[in-house]
Image (tube, rainbow, N blue to C red):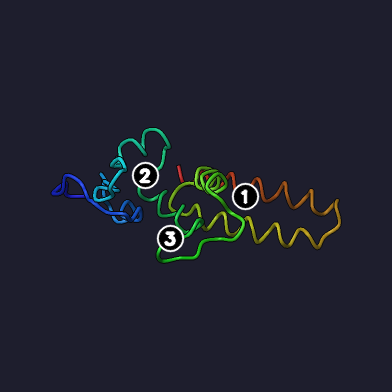
């Protein structure tokens, strides 16, 4: 981003998805302390950059998406970290589809397909790096 703004005053946390670096909340609330959120700290302490926050918003929901039922903050962070890179969500989608298919097979076939899936995902992730 251009760095032309020192900070943003808002009650909306989605601002980080649009590139805000510093957000101040509750400035005009009486009898409450101002809350300050810094993207540098979020990146350092949580390991989440803007792209990862956008992916998290897709899972958890935001003003623009309802989110994915059954996925909370902990699972969302785990998924984003496990399926990183530009194609991470596509790889995750394929992984979920394959798991649904595996439910219809017998156990011996499931094990074979799980091993094949694991190898394919490893290859795809290696290609990303």
Considering every residue shown, the one lying at the far left of the view is 4
> Within the image, what quadrant is residue 6 found in?
top left
| In the displayed structure image, the side of residue 17 where residue 114 appears, left or right | right
The residue pinned by badge 1 equals 120
Q: Where is residue 25 in the image (x, y as percent from the top left)?
A: 29, 48
Considering every residue shown, the one lying at the far front of the view is 31
| In the displayed structure image, the side of residue 103 where residue 72 appears, left or right | left
The residue pinned by badge 2 equals 49
Q: How far is disc 2 from disc 3 in space, using C-alphas?
A: 17 Å
Residue at position x 59%, y 44% in the image: 122
Of 45 and 118, nearer the camera is 45
Q: Position of residue 19 (x, y in %)?
A: 27, 52
Q: At numbered mark 2, what does the secondary structure look like: helix, strand or loop?
A: loop
Q: How far is disc 1 from disc 2 in space, using C-alphas?
A: 27 Å
Split into 4 quadrants, where in the image is the C terminus? top left
- Residue 62, numbered circle: 3
Of 41 and 116, nearer the camera is 41
């Amino acid at each position: 981003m251009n760095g032309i703004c020192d900070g943003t005053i808002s009650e909306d946390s989605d601002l980080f998805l649009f590139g805000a670096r510093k957000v101040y909340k509750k400035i005009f609330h009486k009898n409450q302390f101002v809350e300050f959120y810094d993207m540098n700290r979020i990146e350092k302490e949580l390991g989440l950059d803007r792209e990862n926050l956008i992916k998290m918003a897709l899972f958890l929901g935001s003003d623009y998406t309802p989110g994915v039922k059954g996925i909370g903050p902990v699972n969302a962070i785990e998924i984003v970290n496990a399926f990183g890179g530009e194609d991470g969500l596509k790889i995750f989608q394929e992984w979920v589809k394959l798991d649904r298919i595996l439910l219809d097979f017998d156990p011996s076939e499931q094990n074979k397909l799980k091993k094949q899936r694991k190898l394919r995902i490893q290859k795809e992730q290696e290609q990303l790096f």
